[in-house]
Amino acid sequence: MRVGLEDSLFISRGEPADSNARQAAKIRRIVEDLGCEVATPDEPREMLQLKGTDKVAF
């Protein structure tokens, strides 16, 4: 799941989000309340076979 101001401008219905951090904290709480685990940054890269910044020439 992606989260951040580039994906949604709201933290809840009718309430604008004031930061990406607040959105990330909320979604983390929801995921953990559902009994699931939040992936580390490396886990989705591996699942999606993404290179990561250490392997691209930017």
Image (tube, grey):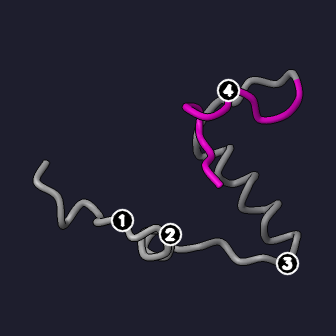
Residue matched to label 3: 35
Residue that mark 2 sits on: 44
Pointer 2 or 3: first along the chain: 3
User: Foreground mark, 4 or 2?
Assistant: 2
The kind of residue on which mark 3 rests is: Gly
Identify which residue is drawn at 39% across, 70% down.
49
Marks 4 and 3, how far apart in space? 26 Å
Disc 1: which residue:
50
| Label 2: element kind | helix
Q: Is residue 38 magenta?
A: no
The CA distance from mark 2 to mark 3 is 19 Å
**Crowd band around label 3 with a 10 angstrom C-alpha radius: few (<14), some (14–19), many (20+):** few
Q: Residue furthest left?
A: 57
Tell me which amino acid carries mark 4.
Leu
Do the residues bearing badges 4 and 1 touch, measured as CB atoms within 8 Å? no
Question: Which disc is residue 9 wearing?
Answer: 4
Check disc 2 and give the amino acid type: Pro
Q: Horizontally, is 48 left or right of 5 in the view?
A: left
User: Percent from the top left, x then y, of residue 9?
Assistant: 67, 26
Q: Work out how far the residue at label 3 is from the one at label 1, CA to CA, in angstroms.
A: 27 Å
Closer to the chain start, of discs 4 and 3, is 4
User: Percent from the top left, x then y, of residue 11?
Assistant: 77, 35
Q: Quadrant of the N terminus?
A: bottom right
Question: 10 Å neighbourhood of mark 1: few (<14), some, or many (≥20)?
Answer: few
Proximity of marks 2 and 1: CB atoms separated by less than 8 Å? yes
Q: Residue at x 36, y 65 (%)?
A: 50
Q: Position of residue 15 (x, y in %)?
A: 82, 25
- The dot on residue 1 is none
Question: Which residues fall within the magenta stretch?
Answer: 1-13
